[in-house]
Image (spheres, rainbow, N blue to C red):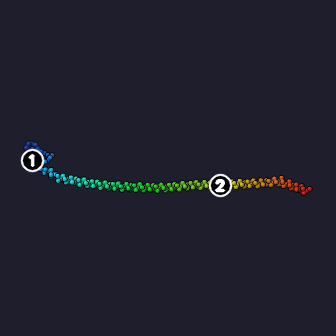
């Protein structure tokens, strides 16, 4: 209605209005202002409700994300602990095998050293036996030599003297 009244007045002045924009409308009693207050209050209320629902949804989403993060962290920590436990078990088993092999090697070395010592003692004993046998043989030869010496120096002259005395 404003457009048709304003257009006819301006047309009579030789101006044609194609489009127009209202910048401000006022009334003295505030009727126009009070018309918009109900709608403004409704829009503000809807905006506050929307903002509260958005915050609620955001908080719920954050809580779910935090829960998922905690689950992932717990799962990751569990897997790390399990891997660490498996590593420690494998390491302990490996260490036990290594220590067993070392102990066997040390025992084998000790056993071999004992065998060598036993062989050396056995050979030393055999050397002593051979030495004693040779000493016995030497002593027997010495006895035979002394008997022959005794025979030749003492018995033979004594028998010769005896024979000579018997003959006289």
Foreground pick, 15 / 102: 102
In depth, the one of 80 and 9 nearer the eye is: 80
The residue that appears at 44% across and 56% down in the rendered structure is 85
- Residue at x-position 49% and y-position 56%: 93
- Considering every residue shown, the one lying at the far right of the view is 168
Q: Percent x, y for residue 82?
A: 42, 56
Helix, strand or loop for disc 1 = helix
In the image: residue 103, left or right of residue 31 = right
Residue 124 x %, y %: 67, 54
Residue 88, which numbered label?
Answer: none
Question: Residue 5, labelled with which disc?
Answer: 1
Residue closest to the far bottom: 166
Around disc 2, counting alpha carbons within 10 Å, would you say few (fewer than 14), some (14 to 19), or many (20 or more)?
few
Residue at the top extreme, as displayed:
14
In the picture of the structure, the residue carrying the numbered disc 2 is: 121
Is 52 left, or right, of 92 in this rendering? left
Disc 1 crowd rating (10 Å Cα; few below 14, some 14-19, many 20+) is few
In percent of width and height, residue 57 lies at 28, 55
Q: Quadrant of residue 143?
A: bottom right
The residue drawn where x is 19% and y is 54% is: 42
First in sequence: mark 2 vs mark 1: 1
Q: Quadrant of the C terminus?
A: bottom right
Q: Determine whether the residue tagged by mark 2 lies in a helix, strand or loop.
A: helix
* Residue at the spot 21% in from the left edge and 52% down from the top edge: 44
Q: Quarter of the image holding residue 67? A: bottom left
Q: Nearer the viewer, mark 2 or mark 1?
A: 2
């Amino acid at each position: 209605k404003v457009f048709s009244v304003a257009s006819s007045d301006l047309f009579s002045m030789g101006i044609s209005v194609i489009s127009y924009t209202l910048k401000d409308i006022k009334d003295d009693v505030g009727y126009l202002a009070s018309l918009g207050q109900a709608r403004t209050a409704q829009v503000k209320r809807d905006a506050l409700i929307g903002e509260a629902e958005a915050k609620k949804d955001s908080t719920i989403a954050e809580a779910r994300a935090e829960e998922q993060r905690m689950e992932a962290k717990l799962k990751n920590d569990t897997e790390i602990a399990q891997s660490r436990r498996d590593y420690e078990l494998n390491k302990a088993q490996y260490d036990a095998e290594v220590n067993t092999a070392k102990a066997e090697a040390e025992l084998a070395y000790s056993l071999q050293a004992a065998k060598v010592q036993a062989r050396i003692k056995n050979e030393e004993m055999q050397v002593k036996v051979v030495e004693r046998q040779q000493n016995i043989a030497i002593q027997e030869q010495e006895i035979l030599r002394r008997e022959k010496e005794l025979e030749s120096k003492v018995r033979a002259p004594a028998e010769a003297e005896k024979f000579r005395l018997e003959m006289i």
